Image (cartoon, rainbow, N blue to C red):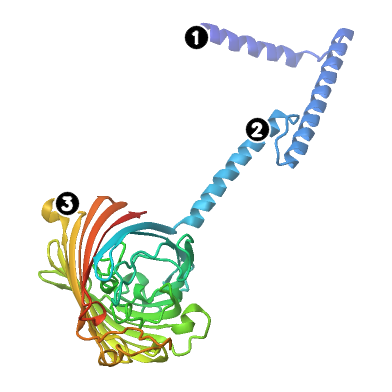
């Protein structure tokens, strides 16, 4: 503390002495002047160097590429900028891909048949599907929109439709007709735009309990109509065509789609979920038929279908789906291979009746048109593997019948549409074709399943004199 006080006292005394004494300017020596000049010159050189370095950096930054001769600072700045741009692009790409979903599946089937007209062994085919859904900009009023595309690739005709049978034993085949089996078929199967609009307009979309839906483009009508939770996918459950969709529409051809199963059209639907989880809806579809389905003609005389559907909770709250629909095809094909107006009605239902047991049924009645069979009924059951500690597995069985129409019964022995002098069918059709299928789906994981299947067809095509046949095979399915 004493030394500090002494320091302050000495400083004060010095200031007083300076204040009382005249100021005398000190004259620098020659050496001091030379030293100062040298320091100024050195500083000037350094400033020039900095200015040149700055100019070099500025010129280097004008070129987006990094060279070996440019300043290190410029190279580092470019590297940092490049990294920042990459991160920005990655973030932008992530934003542009947000909401896009992609799915893919590969189906391979091997089948053989015994009985009937001839035995055939080792028929093989494959089919691959890639589906992409892209979210689109809203049209306002809380609506959501999407663009859906499906690509399908396939090769091999498989067993196909055997003998006089109405139905095919393998609905997974996909190959262009009249082409060599060595040629794969590649197709843009579906491409449609869909919108969901909450109601009422101008209300609160998040609180909406009913909505309008609109779809337009190239579509599979069965993606929206005649649906069924356990009899609607030949890559997962039943393979016989009679069990995949209503036989009158699919096997009988009344749906009017092109040779691959697709057609241009539109769908309008109203869905009400006020009593959720139960719901109901009504929908209408208008699709190209005949030449209009393959874009080689207009949509004149289209295939029109109207459907009422509901999701209910029965059997102590178990979920069930019930659909009833009617259709009219302005270009249905009669027995004489000429276009005529066809019409019919159908029912499709599926219901869970126990913890791991679900049943399904379909009914169809032809109301107008000369067709080979005019009534169809199919029904089946699926048991979940949880009963035997294999939760992802399933055991399914289905049976169906397609009743010969009176018109076909009258003409089947003599009908000669191609005028070659030989009857096209050459037998007296009567009664019904009966179809049975049993399968077991063994699931290895979420992406890989193996499904052995056995089918039997009695009185194929309503030919009472034809021997029944049995088709056995295995389906390998990969999904992503």
- Which residue occupies the extreme right position in the image? 30
Q: As displayed, is residue 185 above or below residue 423?
A: above
Q: Nearer the viewer, residue 369 or 412?
A: 412
Which element is circle 1 on?
A: loop
Other-residue count near label 2 (Cα within 10 Å), few / some / many at <14 / 14–19 / ≥20: few
Q: As displayed, is residue 388 above or below residue 401?
A: above
Q: Residue at position x 65%, y 32% from top?
A: 76
In terms of sequence position, does the residue under pointer 1 or pointer 3 come before the other?
A: 1
Describe residue 396's horizontal placement relative to residue 90 as left or right: left
The residue tagged 3 is 390
Other-residue count near label 1 (Cα within 10 Å), few / some / many at <14 / 14–19 / ≥20: few
Q: Residue at position x 21%, y 86% from top?
A: 430
- Closest to the camera, between mark 2 and mark 1, is 2
Q: Position of residue 184 (x, y in %)?
A: 47, 61
Q: Quadrant of residue 51?
A: top right
Describe residue 196's horizontal placement relative to residue 238 as left or right: right
Residue 79's tag is: none
Q: Position of residue 13 (x, y in %)?
A: 66, 11
Describe residue 104's horizontal placement relative to residue 89 as left or right: left
Describe residue 266's horizontal placement relative to residue 280 as left or right: right
Q: Residue at position x 34%, y 75% from top?
A: 222
Q: As displayed, is residue 266 above or below residue 179?
A: below
Q: Residue at position x 10%, y 69% from top?
A: 316
- Closest to the camera, between mark 1 and mark 3, is 3
The residue tagged 1 is 1
- Inter-mark Cα distance, 3 to 2: 60 Å
In terms of sequence position, does the residue under pointer 2 or pointer 1 come before the other?
A: 1
- Inter-mark Cα distance, 1 to 3: 91 Å
Q: Nearer the viewer, residue 386 or 174?
A: 174
Residue 76's tag is: 2
Asked whether residue 321 appears in the rendered view, the answer is no
In terms of sequence position, does the residue under pointer 3 or pointer 2 come before the other?
A: 2
């Amino acid at each position: 503390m004493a030394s500090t006080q002494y320091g302050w006292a000495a400083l004060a005394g010095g200031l007083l002495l300076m204040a009382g004494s005249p100021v005398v300017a000190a004259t620098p020596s020659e050496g001091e002047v030379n030293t100062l000049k040298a320091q100024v010159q050195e500083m000037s050189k350094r400033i020039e160097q900095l200015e040149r370095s700055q100019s070099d950096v500025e010129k280097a930054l004008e070129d987006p590429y990094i060279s070996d001769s440019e300043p290190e600072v410029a190279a580092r700045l470019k590297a940092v900028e490049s990294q920042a741009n990459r991160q920005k692009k990655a973030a932008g790409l992530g934003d542009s891909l947000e909401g896009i979903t992609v799915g893919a599946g590969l189906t391979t089937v091997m089948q053989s048949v015994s009985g009937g007209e001839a035995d055939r062994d080792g028929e093989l085919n494959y089919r691959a599907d890639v589906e992409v859904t892209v979210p689109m900009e809203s049209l306002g009023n809380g609506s959501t929109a999407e663009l859906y595309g499906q690509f399908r690739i396939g090769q091999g005709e498989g067993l196909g439709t055997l003998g006089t049978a109405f139905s095919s034993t393998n609905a997974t085949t996909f190959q262009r007709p009249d082409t060599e089996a060595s040629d794969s078929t590649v197709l843009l199967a579906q491409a449609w735009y869909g919108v969901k609009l909450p109601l009422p307009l101008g209300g609160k979309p998040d609180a909406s309990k009913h909505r309008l839906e609109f779809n337009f483009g190239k579509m599979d009508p069965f993606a929206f109509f005649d649906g069924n939770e356990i009899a609607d996918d030949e890559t997962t459950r039943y393979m016989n065509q009679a069990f995949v969709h209503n036989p009158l529409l699919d096997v009988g051809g009344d749906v009017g789609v092109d040779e691959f199963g697709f057609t241009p059209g539109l769908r309008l639907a109203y869905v009400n979920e006020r009593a959720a989880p139960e719901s109901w809806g009504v929908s209408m579809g208008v699709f190209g038929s005949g030449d209009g389905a393959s874009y080689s003609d207009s949509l004149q005389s289209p295939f029109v279908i109207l459907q009422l559907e509901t999701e209910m909770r029965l059997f102590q709250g178990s979920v069930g789906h019930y659909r009833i629909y009617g259709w009219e095809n302005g270009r249905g094909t009669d027995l004489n291979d000429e276009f005529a107006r066809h019409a019919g009605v159908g029912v499709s239902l599926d219901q869970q009746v126990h913890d791991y047991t679900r049943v399904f049924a379909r009914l169809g009645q032809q109301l107008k048109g000369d067709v080979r069979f005019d009534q169809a009924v199919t029904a089946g059951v699926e048991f979940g593997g949880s009963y035997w500690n294999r939760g992802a597995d399933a055991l399914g069985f289905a049976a169906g019948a397609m009743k010969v129409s009176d018109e076909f019964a009258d003409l089947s022995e003599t009908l000669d549409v191609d005028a070659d002098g030989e009857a096209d069918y050459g037998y007296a059709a009567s009664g019904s074709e009966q179809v049975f299928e049993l399968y077991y789906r063994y699931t290895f994981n979420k992406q890989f399943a193996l499904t052995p299947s056995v089918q039997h067809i009695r009185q194929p095509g309503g030919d009472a004199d034809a021997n029944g046949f049995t088709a056995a095979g295995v389906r390998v399915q990969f999904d992503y």
